[in-house]
Amino acid sequence: MLGRRFVLVFEGPLPPGRYEVRIWEGRRGGRASQYLRAPIRGRDVKEARARALHVLHHYAGLDRFRLMVEEVACQLLPGAEVEVVEDARDVTVTLAGGYALRVPLVIPRDRVLDPDVDPASLCALARAHLQTHAVRR
């Protein structure tokens, strides 16, 4: 998903008849593998898989956005620490370390997670916002 490899491990049926999916990034058990989160459950394998893919879409999309903003900040503001938080509606970017934002960058979560979003447009938006609103502490 989004150029990254994930392994879904299914278990079940477990009492009370549910199936669980555990998600690993990279090869499970490999040196670079990472367990992503608590198991995702469904009433059957199909539902558990659909829920896991939904979680992965959000995880990978938000992580891609965070990495992109960190790269832009590294280019423009060496030493700035990027902080990205999300809620049900928005993704908010602020800075820590040697820089701050006069106005935080707030982007609708649906736009960041849109599978058809042009990453270059999000990158340009982040770059313009950081150039305009970043100040040294």
Image (cartoon, helix red, strand yellow):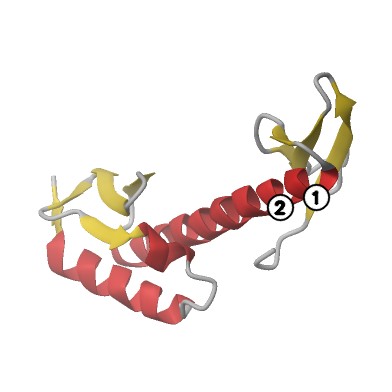
Q: Residue furthest left?
A: 102
| Residue wearing tag 1 | 46
The answer to whether one can see residue 25 in this image is: no
Q: Nearer the viewer, residue 13 or 90?
A: 13
| Three-letter code, disc 2 | Ala
What residue is at 23 percent from the left and 64 percent from the top? 130
| Residue wearing tag 2 | 50
Label 1: which secondary element: helix
Residue 83: percent from left, percent from top: 34, 45
Q: Please tell me how crowded label 1 is: few (under 14), some (14-19), or many (20+) other residues with Cα within 10 Å.
A: few
The answer to whether one can see residue 87 in this image is: yes
Q: Check whether the beta carbons of the residues at disc 1 and disc 2 lie within 8 A of each other.
A: yes
Q: Say left or right for 67 vs 50.
A: left
Residue 115: percent from left, percent from top: 54, 72
Q: Say left or right for 110 vs 103.
A: right
What residue is at 21 percent from the left and 68 percent from the top? 129
Residue 60: percent from left, percent from top: 59, 56
Disc on res. 18: none
Q: Please tell me how crowded label 2 is: few (under 14), some (14-19), or many (20+) other residues with Cα within 10 Å.
A: some
Q: Say left or right for 124 vs 129.
A: right
Q: Is residue 15 above or below residue 59?
A: above
Give the number of callouts: 2
Q: Nearer the viewer, residue 54 or 72?
A: 54
Label 2: which secondary element: helix
